[in-house]
Image (spheres, grey):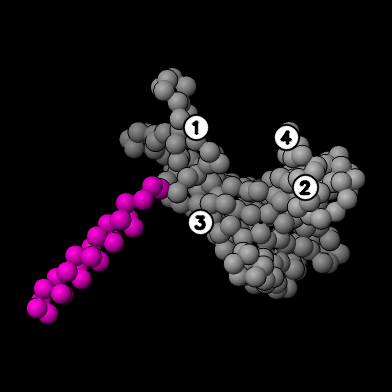
Amino acid sequence: MKGVCFLLTLAVLALATSIATASDPSPLQDFCVAVDEPHKTLFVNGKFCKDPKLVKAEDFFFSGLNTPRDTNNPVGSNVTQLNADKIPGFNTLGISLARIDYAPYGQNPPHIHPRGSEILVVVKGTLYVGFVSSNQDGNRLFTKVLKEGDVFVFPIGMIHFQFNPDHTPAVAFAGLSSQNAGVITIANTVFGSNPAINPDILSRAFQVDKNVINYLQKQFWYDNN
């Protein structure tokens, strides 16, 4: 009888494993609308692959990430993303990289990466960073002041930010667990959508006067990516 129970348990575990591993792959774009005409298709979860016989070292190479970027903009930062568009060899590898330049007192505004976690390392200056957990976890704020060589991790899908509290520039590099992690900047998305979200909805959601929402929706929301 014990042998039968043991075999039954193994069968259930095997079935559970097969179900868990049989799910669809995570999407690598915001949406993918089905189309019946093949000539109108682009790509799904990646790009078309080059013939392996034609692959070169250059397909895995990028030069110039040591060059400072222009941070003269409303948010005081500039994100240089290296994904499969910049390094074709990233395709299907599930990783990407970014350099982030911060002006004195500049910030990378609150945003999320819907398809990847992020690991950030400071290579110059000081950064005040943090993320907010989900509603389920009580929207807890986790923050840290990072110096050169310090590392911080932002879990996938969490609202997070970086701020340079000093009067000198700062630089950080970020690795992401997706070849296209995506970026949703909170203010840009909520108040700068096209077309605009109905102000009555936002007024009630944020519990402020409708005039405040109208004012925010008229602002220019800069994209630093």
View extreme (bottom): residue:
2
Regarding mark 3 in the picture, which secondary structure is present there? loop
Q: Say which quarter of the image contains residue 3.
A: bottom left
Instruction: Give the amino acid type for the residue marked by disc 2 in the picture.
Output: Leu
The Cα–Cα distance between marks 3 and 4, rounded to whole angstroms, is: 29 Å
| Label pair 3/4, CB-CB below 8 angstroms | no
Q: Is 126 left or right of 9, judged from the image as shown?
A: right
Residue 177 is marked as: 3
The residue carrying mark 2 is 202
Among the two numbered marks 1 and 3 on one chain, the one whose residue lies closer to the N terminus: 1
Residue 128 drawn above or below residue 27: below
Pointer 4 residue = 194
The residue shown at (60%, 53%) is 113
Where residue 200 sits in the image (x, y, percent)?
A: 80, 43
Q: Earlier in the sequence, mark 3 or mark 4?
A: 3
* Tag 1 and tag 3, C-beta contact below 8 Å: no
- Main SS of residues in magenta: helix
Could one spot residue 20 in this view of the protein?
Answer: yes
Q: Is residue 9 magenta?
A: yes
Q: Residue at x 16, y 75 (%)?
A: 6
Q: Nearer the viewer, mark 1 or mark 2?
A: 2
Residue 51 location, quadrant: top left
Q: Tell me if I can see residue 122 in this picture.
A: no
The mark found on residue 33 in the picture is 1
What label sits on residue 4 in the rendered view?
none
Q: Crowding at label 4, few (<14), some or many (≥20) Cα neighbours within 10 Å?
A: few
Give the residue type at disc 4: Asn
